[in-house]
Amino acid sequence: MNEKLVQSTGNGLQSSIPKLNVAVIGAGLVGSLAALNFARKGYEVDLYEYRQDIRTAELVQGRSINLALSQRGRKALAEVGLEDEVLSTAIPMRGRMLHDVKGNTSIVLYDSCTKQCLYSVGRKHLNEVLLNAGEKFPNIHHHFEHKLSPFQEDAEAKADLIVGCDGAFSAVRQQMIKNYGFNFSQEYIEHGYLELCIPAKNNEFQMPANYLHIWPRDTFMMIALPNQDKSFTVTLSMPFKVFADIKTPKDLLEFFIKYYIDALPLLGEEKLIKDFFKSKPQYLLSIKCNPYHYESKAVLLGDAAHAMVPYYGQGMNAGMEDCSLLFSIISQTGITLDKALLQFTESRWRDAHAICDLAMYNYVEMRDLTKRVTFKCRKFLDTTLFRFFPTIWVPLYNSVSFTSMPYNKCIANRKWQDKILRNIFYTILSGALVTATALYVTNL
Amino acid sequence: MNEKLVQSTGNGLQSSIPKLNVAVIGAGLVGSLAALNFARKGYEVDLYEYRQDIRTAELVQGRSINLALSQRGRKALAEVGLEDEVLSTAIPMRGRMLHDVKGNTSIVLYDSCTKQCLYSVGRKHLNEVLLNAGEKFPNIHHHFEHKLSPFQEDAEAKADLIVGCDGAFSAVRQQMIKNYGFNFSQEYIEHGYLELCIPAKNNEFQMPANYLHIWPRDTFMMIALPNQDKSFTVTLSMPFKVFADIKTPKDLLEFFIKYYIDALPLLGEEKLIKDFFKSKPQYLLSIKCNPYHYESKAVLLGDAAHAMVPYYGQGMNAGMEDCSLLFSIISQTGITLDKALLQFTESRWRDAHAICDLAMYNYVEMRDLTKRVTFKCRKFLDTTLFRFFPTIWVPLYNSVSFTSMPYNKCIANRKWQDKILRNIFYTILSGALVTATALYVTNL
């Protein structure tokens, strides 16, 4: 069984080796993309989703409404021929628009050199595009509102491979956690988030559309991403105890007047009060594990393998990149499935852990550092060096968001840059000290 | 329900407040000790164990045969009046006896000042003592060979409080892991262990009995603890790949001749070969979580809360100390159960995480550092300072093993000592440099 040869015939359905049955658990963004990839390789794919079909669902609960699509996600979409379709309705965000406590704004472009940008996409729309593309494959069988106990039910007994794309609370992973040697951690942060909305006004955006808006406030922050319908989805992130201290509409308005004065009229007092109190702040957690596979039988992709806090905008992109990597490995001629899955784990876990850590760190940076002088100096240095040496000096944010450089290498790259800047700094400092000493001694 | 007042009437069975029903899951060392503590406070206790009664079991599988009892475990046993009984049959170990690769031995006492020592106790015997003591309480009801799905079965539905003492793979914890805000990690190390035996010869110990024997070999090691029947239980710890490379009896003997030449005749070639190949090396893992409780409904103690690698000999001692702490909190007048459990989590998690980390670190120290000159120098400094300032300068190992200082404070204490030694070192070094410079300049 572990010696099964995986199909390596591109998207040809006429494979010379027996077709494998794949059960993909979870028809979210990563699951529906994985299903497409397997189908293109000629596998028989059963795609299971315990929620109803998102295309006919009224409301999608407990997940952010829009997402920032960047290079890694784009590449994975391009591989299944969907990049153009997705980008055609996405809203480019060219930089961060920072809102200070008085309501003044300033712009920090993501990439003033090569003009790369993030794209705001609706989760529901993107999922629909992926599912619709899957409908065209006779070898993808959709099963919505179908709850599975993995490794147990008949539906899966026939599967040669189970692909767990079932998110941060993955049931597939819950089975794997019992295996010896399965390393795992789940870490909640003491901050929660709550989504609000800045509606369109006279069918127009109420703020400049082509930016990711950030209101950094040291220990907490608010961000806003533009939607297709000219509204903004606003995410308020802060410690649970700060949420808990806002008990009445009066508390809430005072809080917004103090911290988010410019956003208040855009949100609308009445609507803000209604939106804020109708739902509880959501928990945020980081999940790491290793390995991602179990023999030739199961593999985890996306949040099931590496859920992260949302502050690098890489959760979806990293999950989609999992698909790129897995299918590039499976496409190697003659590789067996167990070896392919092992190779997937080995070449992925360090990068996945790295982006989980970066996401955690970027929360501090977004809410706090963006305001500091040291951060601005570094940003200026990075931008300048990037402009002159665009292939050599790629700043961390840019390498993560606008390249496919392995995440772990992005960090190594940054450490190398830190070292160079530090050496330059100390060289200048030593030079100054030597000069000062010489002058002092001369004057003695 | 969360407002239940816990009983604070010592061991009086005539409490003025309604009796609580407690379900203790797991009748191992920590579970049977916890049951005793609850019973002494007048609770109705159901003690569930999925294995058979250890007192009638032929063989206890998958757990080490003997253990090093130290201060924290002794204190917890004293609290239920069992310390003397346990110590009467335990074997004191006054220090480490180090065996080098040629078979030469040297002794490092644990405490040459106050003469404190570890005690080697048999797991089975200790468990028996605890269960027998429990039999005397009419309010403890034993249920052996009883497998539970926590939170689900009738047996537990009637319990006011579920106490998870069900070890590293705790089923109680498996329910709690689904709760929002439950932080958890499990980390396997790449080393496994296998137990061997040096039998008694002519009804005598084959090595000096009052030591913990260590054969440090850099990347792996072997240790031996004395048993009541004058045998030694020997534990071989090494990377799984080193185990895997020993494929034949010939490989095994060559390996022992190379690394453990003095142990070979004591183990006996034939018996060694039989013992080594009859079982597979066992996995070792570290488990951390936080919180340890769920409202007023459940709490985790011992390995279920904080499994650790066995290299500080603190797994059992830390689990027993959990009982000391929990019952000292519950004994506070007027405290409600939910507040008691919250206080238990808050005052315990940092210390439990600390001992998990120390245990991991001590594995490196035992197998590697004990041989190094720097380690010996530090040991000498520590011992000397401890001798002169026995209440001020307690070395790390001694504070962990021979005091009840919170584990986290033991580490803080060590950092403070490191800082002082480092400052002394740099002061001396700077003094020497200044002197040398002055001499050099004078001669210019």
Image (tube, coloured by chain):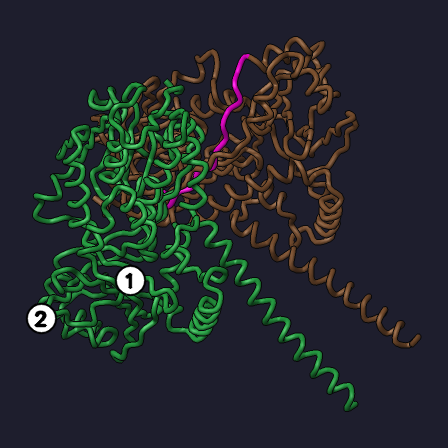
Chain colours: A brown, B green
Q: Secondary structure at mark 2?
A: loop
- Three-letter residue code for mark 1: Met
Look at the picture and state if A295 lies above or below A31: below
Look at the picture and state if A267 lies above or below A181: above
Magenta-colored stretch includes residue A406: no
Report x, y in % for residue A35. 37, 30
Mark in front: 2 vs 1:
2
Q: Kindly identify which residue carries mark 1.
A: B238
Q: Secondary structure at mark 1?
A: strand
**Could you tell whether B100 is left or right of B254 in the image?**
right
User: Residue A90 occupies which quadrant of the picture?
Assistant: top right
Q: Kindly identify which residue carries mark 2.
A: B201
The foreground one among B247 and A236 is A236
**Could you tell whether A8 is left or right of A405 in the image?**
left
Q: Residue furthest bottom?
A: B443
Q: Quadrant of the N terminus of chain B?
A: top left
- Three-letter residue code for mark 2: Lys
Q: Residue furthest right?
A: A443
In this orientation, does residue B109 appear?
yes
Residue drawn at x 52%, y 47% is: A407
User: Residue B177 occupies which quadrant of the picture?
Assistant: top left
The foreground one among A408 and A388 is A408
Report x, y in % for residue B15. 29, 23
The foreground one among A88 and B366 is B366
Look at the picture and state if B198 lies above or below A377: below
Which portion, as a residue range, is magenta? A278-292
Report x, y in % for residue B405. 43, 51
Dot 1, crowdedness within 10 Å: few (<14), some or many (≥20)? Answer: many
Magenta-colored stretch includes residue A285: yes
